[in-house]
Amino acid sequence: MNRHKAIATILVAAALAGCAQTEGQQRAGTGALIGGAGGALVGQAIGGNTKSTVIGAASGALLGAVVGSATTPQRRGEQLCRYQDRYGRIYTAPCDDRYYNGDY
């Protein structure tokens, strides 16, 4: 019965990971799925019981989501920066070369 629950959980997580809207969200979901599976295997191999498997799966999912989100490449022109015009009004617009060159 536990195997059926595990398979159902993996299928639900995979379905939810596919519903993400941005590339960063998709990468975080995929990283969580892969990390959770790997963490569960490592937890089972080290501890040999359910508690170790669950702890490994949770730790792996968290680490996988963080790594997946952090490694999302930022495309030029997608970042929005805040600017102030000569009248003091603040507005947002796509970042210019100063942002990408570190001269802001």
Image: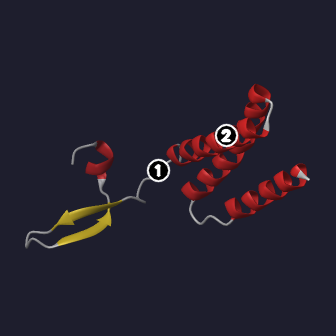
Name of the residue lying farthest toward the left: 87
Q: Is residue 80 left or right of residue 29?
A: left
Name of the residue lying farthest toward the top: 46
Q: Residue at x 73, y 39 (%)?
A: 51
Relative image position of residue 84 (x, y in whole percent): 16, 66
Q: Residue at x 70, y 44 (%)?
A: 36
Q: Please say if 35 is above or below 81.
A: above
* Residue highlighted by disc 2: 55
Q: Residue at x 42, y 53 (%)?
A: 76
Q: Can you tell which quarter of the image residue 50 is in?
A: top right
* Residue highlighted by disc 1: 74
Is residue 96 in view from this perspective?
yes
Q: Secondary structure at mark 2?
A: helix
Q: Can you tell which quarter of the image residue 90 is in?
A: bottom left
Relative image position of residue 86 (x, y in whole percent): 8, 69
Q: Amino acid at mark 2?
A: Ile
Q: Is residue 87 left or right of residue 69?
A: left
